[in-house]
Amino acid sequence: MTSIRREGGASFRNGITMLEVLVVIGVIAMLAALILPAVQAAREVARRAQCTSHMRQLGQGIASYEGIRGNYPIRDGKVGPAIYWSPYVELLPHIGEQNVYGNIDFDKGIDLQRGDPHGSYIQDNNAALLTTLPLLLCPSDTSEEGTNYRFCAGSLPSATGGDGAFSWHRTDSGTALGKPALVTDGESHTVAMSEKLVSPRGSGWSRLHNFWYSGYHNVMGYPYGGRNRIAPDEMIDVCKLTPDDPVSWHPFSGQSWSQCWFAYVLYNHVAPPNSEIPDCTPWNANPNSWLDQSQQSPTEGMFTARSWQPGGVNVLFLDGHVRFISDSVDLAVWRGMASIDGGENIDVP
């Protein structure tokens, strides 16, 4: 407040000058510039700690399931008419979601005539399969559905006959399952899960969230289903060709925890964490075939671990411990961590 006093006929004005105001504003701005990043960093540390806690709980659930069943959660139970349940469905009772598990009618299962996870369930199972499970979401992401934590299919592009703990057709006596005895690389050196971003519902194409249907199988004359076994480096070269605005891409990545394959609950170690190269599949997206992008979750491609956490991703190993792996990890080491029996002599960073 400004006041005026008179002495000997002279007027004097007491108050704050414009210069002083500017100085105060400058000091406040400087303090804010110093404090806000620290606050944001502290919040991210807390979010990262919560993500780590979630993964440890999932590791405990996997260990509980394995202790009872003798194998890791199955990738496709083919229970009733349902095709390709994700491992989460069998894991539900072991992660505190017995009620959700009990509400699933396995005699009716999932209708996979459409790929949209919000409209493809048998009506009787909607309440259970569309339930949001907070344990499956990382607070660093903004998604409120599906899962940020995916099961490792291995180091190869194909999930059918792959080399990971959760690759399909990792068989023992003809049954699609994985057993600890098959993990000759050691559970403490073999990855079970890592993080991946969930595609925001109703959003457009995103190189971080979605994947491209490249049609590479058709171009090269390869048979359907990855039986040609595209090499990891070859798959990377294909994904490098992803257009800036592709016509054929999958809009629902990660939005379901109950459906299987790479669109929802699997990932692989073809590329290092948070690679700048977008995900893609060699499958086509011919709207006149059953490989239409609105219908299919691929069994082959490059599906990279990704998170919003600066510098890397959290990784859960089969023995239950969680580590933060840097984006700069050596690719050979990263791939070696994903295989259960590759015989790689690696030190986990």
Image (cartoon, grey):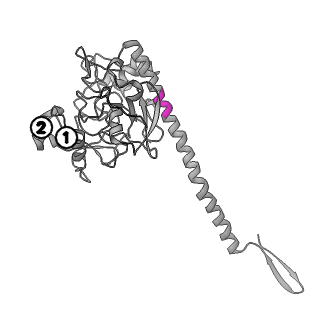
- The residue wearing badge 2 is 222
Q: Position of residue 26 (x, y in %)?
A: 63, 66
Disc 1 is placed on an element classified as: loop
Residue beneath disc 1: 282
Q: Could you say whether the residue bearing mark 2 is in a helix, strand or loop? A: loop
Name the mark on residue 59: none
Would you say 169 lies left or right of 9 here? left
The amino acid beneath tag 2 is: Tyr
How many numbered discs, if any?
2
Residue visible at 23% across and 38% down? 294
Instruction: Residue at the far right: name it.
Output: 8
Q: For residue 291, which quarter of the picture?
A: top left
Decide whether residue 25 is among the magenta residues.
no
Between 309 and 250, the residue placed more toward the observer is 309
What quarter of the picture does the N terminus occupy?
bottom right
Q: Position of residue 320 (x, y in %)?
A: 45, 25
Contact, mark 1 vs mark 2 (Cβ under 8 Å): yes
The magenta region covers: 52-56
Q: Position of residue 169 (x, y in %)?
A: 24, 23
- Residue 55 falls within the magenta-colored stretch: yes
Amino acid at pointer 1: Pro
